[in-house]
Image: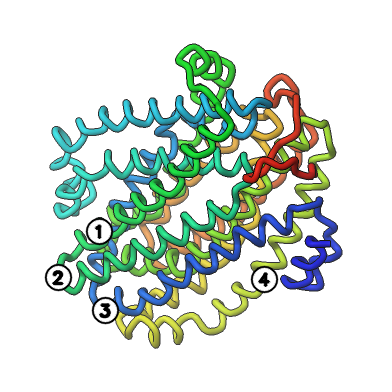
Amino acid sequence: MEDRFFSGLLSPAFKSLRLSDGFVRSVFVLMSGTTLAMMAPVAAAPILTRLYTPHDYGVFALYVSIVTVLSVPIGGNYDAAVMLPAKDEDALNLTAVCLAISFLVSVVLLLGPCFFAGPIGAFFGSTRIATWLWFVPLLGFLMGIQQAFSNWVNRKRQFRRLAASRVVEAVVSPAMSVGLGMRAWGVGGLVAGLLGGKVAAVWMLGRSVRQGKKRWGLPVRAKTMLEQARKYRDFPLYSAPASFLDILALQIPVLVLTRFYDSSVVGWFALTTRVIGTPLALIGSCVAQVYYQWIAEAGRRNADLRSYTMRVALYLTIMVSGPILIAVIFSPSVFSLVFGEQWRVAGEYARILVFPLAIKFVVSPLSVTMPASGNIRLGSMWKIVYFSSTAVVLFIAAHFQARTFLCIYGAQELVLYSLCFFLILRASARLRPEMIGSRSRPLRGQDGSEEALP
């Protein structure tokens, strides 16, 4: 009954999807928090674009790209395996494995600014970035903790707490950036805001993990950590390197633009992807987290994963059709009015970039089908193909004007993510029981009560 109510709120068209019990309700909970989380950055954006220049945004975009590339596999990708063990004790020990590896890798990353800050800045033609490289290990460690804690909270179906952490992060980050921007901190204001938001989110998620550990009396032992690390070794051996290449491929546009174009072009590109891509990515991550929990459990019961995948793909396609139309028609005028005339070019970029961002919105959440079904190597193969193709195509495209570069980038994204969707459907039909385990007892919600299964 609750599912019918929530699906009716979203759109009558969604009623035909007939998603599994609780799925729409859980997505709606996360989306409600995500909507609140998006309000603060949206409200602050017109202020930030008047406090910071396109050049500031360009340097900040390069910093975020470097951190993102290093932080995604920082925990050995064991965070993606937290959802899979049948026992909560094993899952909590995997979370501890993620934290330990994240700390060790962050310490190693300190060598980068010690010895390579100057060469990195010179390579990208941005000497200002060298100063902020010292904060890369800290932010990477925070992001590693956030990934691990988020998957544990997601496993326990504590979707309200996930939503609350996103709201807090979304409020703290722009608030700090606005305050420091008024003091003319420049790029430092944007970096400090990002750090502050991550600290707040990690603190909230950490409280949830700590309370859950005490409530259910789950021990963390070195022996169990090593056992689980060995059992799910495919994640660091295959998934982590492939995820590194995958996220590097996602950041290649910013890295290539920084290398071959003026920093203002990078700033326009960054604002466009932030205004359009960030809301889509946040909503997509809500769907992905709920979908991962559902499909992992469905995989342990040998359910038909292909039907789940097709239904959610239709759901996401319906959701993104409206933003595409709005961006194509109104984006230049809206960007100029809201952010200032110096950002009109970003609105023109939005007409091109909305299409690759839209297909990512549809396909990316579904990619969790690969680890959920035990097809780690198939997912790794796709990430290697995506990285190789993106690197070659965008390096060639960098010899053209900026708008031509963006058109080529958009076209290759459409082709490659269509291939990804085909591989996802293939993975949904190829379950690997030895990787996904079996359910020994029902999953329990945040109140400890037994939850309905998909």
The residue pinned by badge 4 equals 321
Between label 3 and label 2, give the one nearer the viewer: 2
In space, the residues marked 1 and 2 are separated at their CA atoms by 15 Å
Quadrant in which residue 45 is drawn: bottom left
Type of amino acid under label 3: Arg
Return the residue nearer the eye: 18 or 201: 201
Determine which residue is flagged by label 3.
50
Q: Are marks 1 and 2 in contact (CB under 8 Å)?
A: no
- Please give the name of the residue rendered at 33% of the width and 45% of the height, measured from the top-left corner: 67
* Quarter where residue 284 is shown: bottom right
Instruction: Give the amino acid at mark 1.
Output: Val
Q: Where is 64 relative to 140, above or below?
A: below
- Label 1 residue SS: helix
The residue carrying pointer 1 sits among few (fewer than 14), some (14 to 19) or many (20 or more) residues within 10 Å by Cα, namely many
Tell which of 373 and 174 is nearer to you: 174
Q: Nearer the viewer, mark 3 or mark 4?
A: 3
What's the amino acid at mark 2?
Ala
**Quarter of the picture holding the N terminus:** bottom right
In primary-sequence order, the first of circles 4 and 1 is: 1
Q: Residue at x 85, y 57 (%)?
A: 18
- For the residue pair 234 and 152, the one nearer the viewer reads as 152
**Mark 1 vs mark 3, CA separation in Å:** 16 Å
Tell me whether the residue at label 3 lies in contact with that at label 4, contact meaning CB atoms closer than 8 angstroms.
no
Disc with the residue nearer the chain's start (1 vs 2): 1
Q: Secondary structure at mark 3?
A: helix
For marks 1 and 3 on the same chain, the one whose residue lies earlier in the sequence: 3
> Is label 1 or label 2 in front?
2
Q: Nearer the viewer, mark 1 or mark 3?
A: 3
Residue 275 vertical placement versus 216 (above, below): below
Q: CA distance from mark 3 to mark 4?
A: 31 Å
Q: Which residue is mark 2?
A: 184
- For the residue marked with disc 4, what is the amino acid? Ser
